[in-house]
Amino acid sequence: MTRYSFAFAALAASGAYAAQGAAYAQCGGQGWTGATTCVSGYHCETQNAWYAQCVPGAGAGAAAPAAPKTTMVTMARTSTPAAKAPATKTSAKAVAPATNKAAVVAAAPVSSSGKTQYAGMNIAGFDFGCDTSGSCSGAYVDPGANGIAQMQHFTKDDKLNIYRLPIGWQHLVGNTLGGALDATVAGAYDKLVQGCLATGAVCLIDLHNYARWNGQIVGQGGPTNDQFADVWSKIATKYASEKNIAFGLMNEPHDLTMSAWADSAQAAVTAIRKAGAKSQMILLPGTDYTSAGTFPTASGPSLLKVKDADGTTDKIIFDVHRYLDSDNSGTHTECTSNHVEDSFVPLATWLRSNKRQAILSEVGGGNTASCETDVCAAIASLNKNSDVYLGYIGWSAGAFDRSYVLGLTPDGSTDQALVTKCFSRA
């Protein structure tokens, strides 16, 4: 499957469209039918073929900055429904308290508990401004207190117990490869992490760069494996004592050599453990935007060799994504397949035969009848095979507006239809 990033989607002032788009609202893109101009002080900037956004400045007439700059927009909690309501994608509940330990996979056949251990939500924002080339030239959005409130809501009302917190590599290190963690960005991000930890959930740190830095592939002509390991060493050092932290090595690698990527992943795993984070889960993504559909053949065989220093793999979990629209891109409100028979069941069989487990860290759809049918069926399949599927995480809450194509932003504590129908375990 081809997965296109919507990391540029941002917060709008309200859920309704006006003649002009509000600050950071969507203003264009394939299939867009809303406002295409922006309020005073903002211009409509195309981020990719599927998304354009109202960003500060005068547009083409504005002077370009001398060098790429990481900027931040703070998502404030206000009394308006759009800001107050968590932007969500899928909300799922967990009955047991969150833990960091993956269940041991026994030899096939294995009985399933009928419910995955984890179910949760992406809290996006710190990944905004990054695209599939691994460039992060736009502004990120700090979900702030609102993002924390969302996690509190999802934990309390929907019984979620895992949150994925994506962040752009460049944002995190001040746009300097090999640089120290940026005090401002890392500090703001840490507030989100601490808010997540306070809920008792597992908090999954996700480097959202598609296995790239400014178009160059990690370990394949771009950042060296040592540079990739270095950033993970710094992150792991910061959170080594937090048992409910998990590490997602990279969002959606694509168009790369898997054997070389496995070496890069091993370097990062080794660095994380050497930094003192010895008990936490580490998620390994594959190529094809870490597609669940192609993972058994395109990614898994190479990643099987990635292990902890003692040779074990029970805390090394495979990271997969799957969208259910016509081109599997996650860019349409309608779903066309649940992908149970062509993706989730074959992957479960492969995982079981190799005594491994996976987490579906991105899945979702529009608030439509077709997606209610297909997303619910997909989740049911994961629950049925919970011996090998540890959990699933919806895309995406955080700084997304309710108008986002896959937006499942609650209105206060009231969830949208897809959350209520498919994801909530309350």
Image: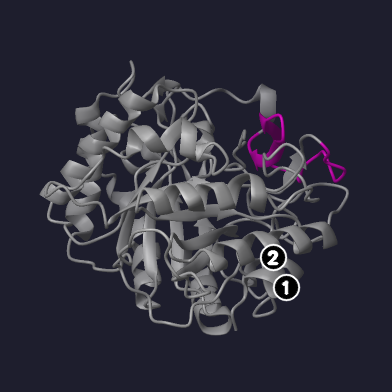
State the residue position of label 2.
Answer: 376
Classed neighbour count for the residue bearing mark 2: other residues with Cα under 10 Å, few (<14), some (14–19), many (≥20): some
Does residue 345 lie above or below 391 as drawn? Answer: above
Quadrant of image for the C terminus: bottom right
Q: Residue at x 69, y 62 (%)?
A: 377
Q: Which mark is residue 421?
A: 1
Amino acid type, mark 1: Lys
Return the residue found at the far front. 109
- Is residue 32 highlighted in magenta? yes
Q: Quadrant of residue 222?
A: top left
Between residues 292 and 5, which one lies in front from this camera angle? 292
Does residue 253 lie above or below 370 as drawn? Answer: above
Q: Secondary structure at mark 1?
A: helix
Q: Are marks 1 and 2 in contact (CB under 8 Å)?
A: yes
The stretch in magenta equals: 31-57
Coloration of the structure image: one colour
x and y percent of residue 137 in the render? 49, 31
- Is residue 163 highlighted in magenta? no
Q: Which mark is residue 61?
A: none
x and y percent of residue 74 in the render? 51, 57
Q: Residue at x 57, y 23 (%)?
A: 63
Quadrant of image for the N terminus: top right
